[in-house]
Amino acid sequence: MLFTLIKKEFLLEFRQKSTLGGVLVYVIGTIFVSALCFKGHMDKPTWNALFWVITLFTSVTISGKSFLKETGGQALFNYLHYSPQHFIIAKILYNMAFMLILSLVTFFFYAFFIKNEVENISLFLLVLFLASTGLAGILSLMSAIAAKASGNFAMMSILSFPVVMPLILVVIRLSKQAVDGLDWAGVGLDFISILAALNVLTLALAFLLFPYLWRD
Amino acid sequence: MRSWYKILSVILILYTLVWGLLGNVPRLDILNETIRNVFYHVPIWFAMLFMMTVSLIYSLKTLGSNSLHHDSKAYDAAWIGFFFSIPGITTGSLWAKYTWGTWWTFQDPKLNGVAISILIYTAYFILRSSVEDEQKKAKISAVYNVFAFVMMNVFIMILPRLTDSLHPGNGGNPAFAKYDMDNGMRMVFYPAVIGWILFSFWLFEIKNRISILKNKLND
C-alpha cells in the first residue's frame, strides 16, 4: 500500500514534466542571478546562508503543491482507498527524496556557477540529508493545512516560514562547520543530535496530526 | 466566590509594582538598578507562555472532541498570549537600551525566538481568518496550533541553550539566576509571576465571554 502510494507520487511527477522542469529552471535561474549579483565576491558565511535560502525556497515550492492537487474527487478517492498514516508517510518520503535530489542538484550548480566552498563534503552531505528529512516532515504537514485552508500558495509560505526557522537555524550552523572544514573530531556532536532530535520530533508530529486533517 | 483570583491578581500586581521599585536589590555590574526589570519583564513572559499553554490544551481538546466551544477558547487564549508579547517586548527593549545599549539585537537567540514566535502566532491568526467553514477552521487551526506551540518551545527553550545568549544568566553574564537573586527579590518576583498569570487568566475569561456573546448574536 505504502509502496503504491510512493510509486504513484513519482509517476505523477514524471508524467507532468512541466513541474519538474519548472523547479529545475527555478533553481538554476536563482543561482545564476546570485552568481551575477555577487560576481564572485562571496565569503564563506554568505555562501552558506545563500545556499540555504535557495534550498529553503525550492523546498517550499516543491512541497507546496504536494497536497494542492488532492482536492475534490481525488481527495474522496484517497479517503476511501488509503489510510491517513500511509498517505502522510508516502508524502513525506516522496518529498524527502525529491528535496534531497534537488538540494544535490542545487549544490552542483551552485558549486559550478559560484564556487565550492565546502571543505568537509561528507558532513555537508549528512546535513543535506538531515535537512531534507526535517523539511519534508514540516512542509508536508504545512502543505496539507494550506491545501485545506485556501488552496493557494501564499498561505503555504505564510504558514511554513515561521515554523521552519528553528530547523533552518540549526542546519545553517552545522553546515557552516562543514563549509569551514572542521574535521569529524571537531564537529559539535550536540548539533547533529539536536538536528536529528528535531527531525524525529517533526516527523512524529506530522504523523500524529495529519489524520485529523484527513476527514472533512 | 469566583472572583477571588481577580482580587488576588490585582493585589499581587499592585504590590509588586510598588515594592519592585522601592525594595532593596543587590548591586551587580552592568545591571545595577535595571535588575528591577526582572519583576516586570519576566513575569509577563511567563503569563504569555501560560496562555499559549492554555491555548495548546484547548486545541488538543478540539482535536479530541471537535467542539467549536473548545476551538474558540483556544483562539481566545492565543489572542491573550499574543497580547502579552507586546508589553513583554517593550519592557525587554527598554531594558536592553540601558544595559546592552541597543533596542534590539540579532545576536541573542531569545530575541530571535520571540520574534519568530510572534510570526508563528500571526500565521495562526491569518490561517483562522482565511477559512470560512467553522468546523474546518476548528480542526485546521488546532493542528497548526499544536505544531506551532512545539516549534515555539524549541525556539525559546532549546535553541538558546545551544549558544551563548546575551540574556542575564546565560554565557557568563551577571544575572538574576538562582545565585544572584536574594531573598528580598524572591519575595517580589514569585508574587509577580503568580499575579500576572492570574491576571492573564482573568483577561482570558473576559475575552471568552465576549466570544460567547458574539456567537449568540450571530446565531
Image (cartoon, helix red, strand yellow):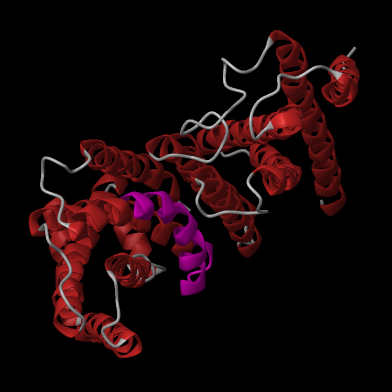
Q: Is residue B187 left or right of residue A115?
A: right
User: Between residues B89 and B63, which one lies in front from this camera angle?
Assistant: B89
Q: In percent of the image, x 88 and y 19: which residue is there?
A: B15
Q: Which residue is nearer to you in this view: A121 or B212?
A: A121
* B119 versus B150 height, above or below: below
In terms of image quadrants, where is residue B192? top right
Q: Quadrant of residue B57?
A: top right
Q: Residue at point 18% right, 85% down?
A: A113
Q: Is residue A110 left or right of residue B215?
A: left
Q: State the image coordinates of residue B21 (x, y, percent, origin top left).
A: 86, 26
Q: Residue at x 59, y 27 (%)?
A: B175
Q: Nearer the viewer, residue B24 or B80?
A: B24
Q: Is residue A130 left or right of residue B119?
A: left
Query: Where does residue B64 sit, x and y in percent of width and height?
Result: 51, 33
Residue B110 in view here: yes
From this view, report whether residue B48 is shown above or below residue B82: above
Q: Position of residue A87 (x, y in %)?
A: 27, 52
Q: Please state, as top left, top right, bottom left or bottom right, where the N terminus of chain B lies in the image.
A: top right
Pick out the residue farthest to the top: B183
- For residue A92, say whether it is visible: no
What segment carries the magenta color?
A: A148-170
Dominant SS of magenta comes to helix
Tell me what residue is drawn at x 22 percent, y 80 percent: A20
Farthest bottom residue in view: A36
Whether residue B186 is in magenta: the answer is no
Instruction: Please name whichever residue, A153 or A173, is drawn nearer the observer in this view of the structure.
Output: A173
Percent position (x, y) of residue B206? 85, 36
